[in-house]
Image (cartoon, rainbow, N blue to C red):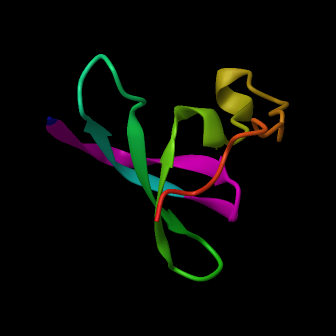
Amino acid sequence: MSILQLDPPLPVITPKGDGYAHMLIDYGPEYHLLWVCFLDDSGECWTYNNTQIRAQKNVTLGRTFVSRHQAKSASAAE
């Protein structure tokens, strides 16, 4: 297992709203990466896997549209 602190944190869209991913947890090749995110509205900390989050728009990088599609099996890890 390894943990990476993201510096700077990455702005992401989660099932519970916009937030910032501060850490990335990698349990190895048989698992999804886990993103530790703090939500903008509530300050809550949630952990999501790759299928549950999206990067926020970034006009500077040319990412002007982000799909808010969520996988059918997506649920927040508690």
Between 69 and 10, the one nearer to me in the picture? 69
Write the residue at 73% across / 21% down.
62
The answer to whether residue 11 is above or below residue 65 is: below
- Closer to the camera in the image, 52 or 18: 52
- Seen in the picture, residue 68 relative to 60 is either above or below; the reply is below
Q: Does residue 43 lie above or below 7 as drawn?
A: below
User: Where is residue 68 drawn, in percent x and y?
Assistant: 83, 41
Residue at x 57%, y 57% (from the top left corner): 76
Residue 37: % across, % down? 46, 58
Question: Which span is picked out in magenta?
Answer: 2-19
Residue at 67% in and 44% down: 74
Q: Which residue lies furthest to the top in this view?
A: 29
Q: Is residue 46 left or right of residue 56?
A: left
How would you classify the magenta stretch by its main secondary structure? strand
Q: Residue furthest left?
A: 1
Residue at left 63%, top 42%?
52
Question: Residue 8 colored magenta?
Answer: yes
